[in-house]
Amino acid sequence: MSDKGLSDESVASACQDGDPITKDFMMQQTMLRVKDPVKSLDFYTRILGMTLLQKFDFPAMRFSLFFLGYEDKREIPSDVKDRTSWTFSRRATLELTHNWGSESDESQSYHNGNSDPRGFGKMKGLAFIQDPDGYWIEILSPNNMMSITA
């Protein structure tokens, strides 16, 4: 690599077609641990416009999972089995994991990967916001991406 980043040719060379054995696989979710699900659900739904797709509780292990994505609420199946299958067929969802009781434990925190943010540069049309657990989230308008990347 050079001090100019990867060339277009290097990028093209690094991005190969998937192995046929993985043709039915996809990146379905990324997971973030959250301290207070009420604050996090508010942030991701109200601020970022995501939709809660499904919630799973695991009482024996004292945690809950919340799956969010950019989906039309009207398309979410009402039947639990259908909804579960549908939820896990969505691409690139967000899974919020909440360990019960962490919201009232003052000493509990999660490493957010950005403990010492050094900045993100200045690119017009992009912004970064912090979620309630300190994760930095890049937000952008897809309609403006051509002008940003040109």
Image (spheres, rainbow, N blue to C red):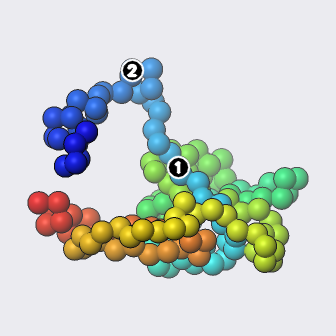
Quadrant hosting residue 1: top left
Q: Secondary structure at mark 2?
A: helix
- Residue 59 placement, left or right of 45: right
Residue extending farthest to the left is 150
Q: Secondary structure at mark 1?
A: strand
| Rendered location of residue 7, percent (x, y) | 17, 41
- Residue 30 placement, left or right of 126: right
The residue drawn where x is 82% and y is 70% is: 101
The residue drawn where x is 62% and y is 49% is: 84
115 w.r.t. 63: above or below:
below
Quadrant hosting residue 33: bottom right
| Rendered location of residue 74, percent (x, y) | 48, 65
Q: Amino acid at mark 2?
A: Pro
Q: Nearer the viewer, residue 12 or 88?
A: 12
| Rendered location of residue 28, percent (x, y) | 50, 45
Quadrant hosting residue 54: bottom right
- Residue 61 placement, left or right of 46: right
The residue drawn where x is 44% and y is 61% is: 71
- Residue 29: numbered disc: 1
Q: Quadrant of the C terminus?
A: bottom left
Give the Cα distance between marks 2 and 1.
21 Å
Residue extending farthest to the front is 3
22 w.r.t. 46: above or below:
above
Total number of numbered labels? Answer: 2
Residue corresponding to mark 2: 20
